[in-house]
Image (cartoon, helix red, strand yellow):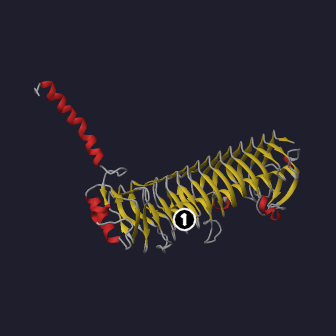
Amino acid sequence: MFLSRRNLLLGSLATVFATPSRAQAQKPPGKPEGLDAAQFGVRANAAGDQTLALQRAIDRAAKAQQPLWLAAGLYRSGPLTLRAGSQLTGARGARLALTRGPSLLTAQDTDALALSGLTLDGGNVPLAHDGGLINLTGARNLRIADCTIANVNGNAIGLFQSSGAVTGNSITGSADNALYAVDNFGLEIRANKIAKSGNGGIRVWQSTKRSDGSIVAGNTIEDTQARAGGSGQNGNGVNVFRASGVIVRDNVIRRAAFSAVRGNAASDFQVIGNNCEGFGETAMYAEFEYENASFIDNVIDDAANGIAVTNFDVGGHGGVVRGNIVRNIGQRVLSTLTDGSGNGFGISVEADTIASGNTIENCAYAGLRLGFGPYLRNVTASGNTIRRSPFGIVVSVVRGAGRAAIIDNSISGATRGAIVGVEWHKAVSGDLALGGAEKFPTLRVSGNKVS
């Protein structure tokens, strides 16, 4: 054939465009870029423990700054140490099973760790106390994504002094917590599915009161128990302790022994847009030495109490409780509620707090409780709709109680009084919505509609 300039050009272009197709055809389908663990002697479904081979593969991949890829199958292993830059990923069906503790994957003072697409099976092997099946300390810019974690005899994930993201994971049957996060900064905990945790779904804790800034968003947390007992530190879907600046939003939380969201000494704490059902105690809490807590646009159905912004006695103060829907409160424990000493209030606030625009119905005791004993200061209840509770609003009028404004609320079906002054648990006034509020100089009652 005559080789013209045109023929040479067309032939060169054909070669250029054919090369990627041939390269793609040689790449195993579904296998991502990176190093295959098999080339370091790791074998799927091998009968024996593969800790040494897996550790060699992790070390070599990190040194080469390449992801390490596991094919589908079972890999039995003891503790493995991740290195700076370790990226461990698996094909669908790649399962690491723990053979001995104290953990499966650990790291100390590392950067840019990534775990994705793995199934991690704890095998109910005992773990280190307060550690985790994944146990990371000082991990910066970490990513744990799209993993499945099950059968953990302790915490599924333990993060300490770390930053990064935990997203899209499925965590089931952890004997302690699904995620135990202590002394971290700016974690993103998003879109995880958590079920059947022994003591807690997600814990965001600091060892002393300080900034944390974590975001807990879009998770589904179900069937949280309190196997270790206690008075509230266990049995919560989300528990924030001493950590400030934490946002808990847009989660679905169902069935917990204690609370859906509990903030203890958690300042600048925002709880927004969560959908919650079925709690053995108060569904949402800001308690003890918190400053500034917001509960906005949440839905709560079926709990012993709805929302409590409390503990003015130890300095807890400052809050906004707005736009929440709170229903069916205290109905499981009616026998303890006749004097208000037990459960059954929709929303309770004590100091420097506004409760406005909430819809509250079917509470066994009261829709709103303002103050408790002398623990009342600068509280406003306005624009709330309260239906079918024995008391619509109870407000403390004991000696030493501070000011409260009760304005423009709509109250219906309150069989024992729409607005009633109380001394501790005892009702001591008539229905103040109908008159008589002038006897209590700390109260301002106006514009309320009663039916």
Q: Is residue 289 left or right of residue 434?
A: left
Work out whether residue 337 or residue 169 is closer to the camera in this orientation and state it.
169
Work out whether residue 179 or residue 210 is closer to the camera in this orientation and state it.
179
Neighbor class of circle 1 (other Cα within 10 Å; few <14, some 14-19, many 20+) is many
Question: Is residue 285 visible in this depiction of the protein?
Answer: no
Q: Position of residue 379 (x, y in %)?
A: 71, 48
Q: Residue furthest left?
A: 2
The quarter of the picture where residue 348 lies is bottom right
Work out whether residue 107 or residue 410 is closer to the camera in this orientation and state it.
107
Q: Position of residue 259 (x, y in %)?
A: 65, 59
- Residue receiving disc 1: 177
Q: What kind of element bears circle 1?
A: strand
Residue under the image location 82 percent in, 56 percent down:
422
Q: Residue furthest front?
A: 1
Q: Residue flagged by tag 1: what amino acid is it? A: Asn
Residue under the image location 81 percent in, 44 percent down:
445
Q: Position of residue 340 (x, y in %)?
A: 80, 60
Image quarter in which the N terminus is found: top left
Residue under the image location 35 percent in, 63 percent down:
82
Q: Position of residue 392 (x, y in %)?
A: 81, 49
Question: Is residue 62 visible in this depiction of the protein?
Answer: yes
Image quarter in which the C terminus is found: top right
Q: Is residue 102 above or below residue 278?
A: below
